[in-house]
Amino acid sequence: MSQIVYVINGPNLNLLGSREPDVYGHTTLSDIETIATKAGASRGLSIEFLQSNEEGALVNWIQEAREKAVGLIINAAGYTHTSVAIMDALLASDIPIIEVHLSNIYKREDFRHHSYVSKAASGVICGFGAHGYTLAVDAMANLLKSD
Ligand code: DQA
């Protein structure tokens, strides 16, 4: 049976495709789910792809991933820059964590330069749009191999 990797997406990412396309591109979240699922399948990983606009739901999935998954990829979106609760949930987890952002957060407003998620992540992929999810799945497969 394939190993399960959770891919958790935060607020407003459900609007991808129509939301600020100049920043986030035209790819929808459903397209990204397809891309991530295919990338996972070719590396023997089964992707559990999730999105919520609610902080508590994200915390619950991070906690669930500790029990059910071998790795966690997260784009916490706006909560990246604000959520101690998400950071704490990630720190409580001992599976590898990869942080993803579609945009290059370091090229944007100062408030996006700080990430609570980074405190718990093995690495960060940002600025490559939807392709960042493929890169993250690839990086996760490598981390799991070297475990
Ligand atoms: C984002 C970057 C965040 O700063 C922003 O709040 C988002 C999306 C990204 O994927 O580029 O909602 O995480």
Image (tube, rainbow, N blue to C red):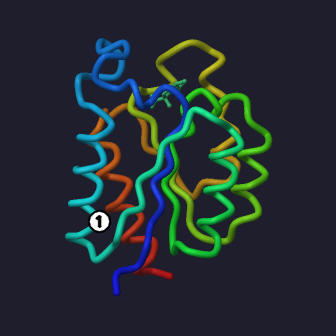
Residue located farthest toward the bottom when viewing the structure as drawn: 1
Label 1: which secondary element: helix
- Residue position for label 1: 40
Q: Residue 87 appears at what percent x and percent y? A: 73, 47
Q: Residue 13 appears at what percent x and percent y? A: 44, 30
Tally of numbered discs: 1
> Which quadrant of the view contains residue 84?
top right
Tell whether circle 1 marks a residue whose Cβ is less than 8 angstroms from ligand 1.
Answer: no
Quarter of the image with the N terminus in it: bottom left
Q: Residue 77 appears at what percent x and percent y? A: 54, 32
Up the image or down, 126 lies above or below 133; here it is above
Tell which of 104 and 88 is nearer to you: 88
Up the image or down, 104 lies above or below 60; here it is above
> Which quadrant of the view contains residue 80?
top right
Q: Residues within 10 Å of mark 1 (few under 14, many from 20)?
A: many
Tell which of 143 and 78 is nearer to you: 78
Is residue 66 shown left or right of residue 74? right
Q: Residue 58 appears at what percent x and percent y? A: 63, 46
Tell which of 74 and 115 is nearer to you: 74
Q: Residue at left 74%, top 58%?
A: 91
Q: Residue at left 45%, top 36%?
A: 101
> Which quadrant of the view contains residue 127?
top left
Is residue 94 shown left or right of residue 16? right
Amino acid type, label 1? Gly
Q: Residue at left 63%, top 75%?
A: 67
Up the image or down, 32 lies above or below 77; here it is below
Q: Residue at left 69%, top 56%?
A: 90
Is residue 106 shown left or right of residue 19? right
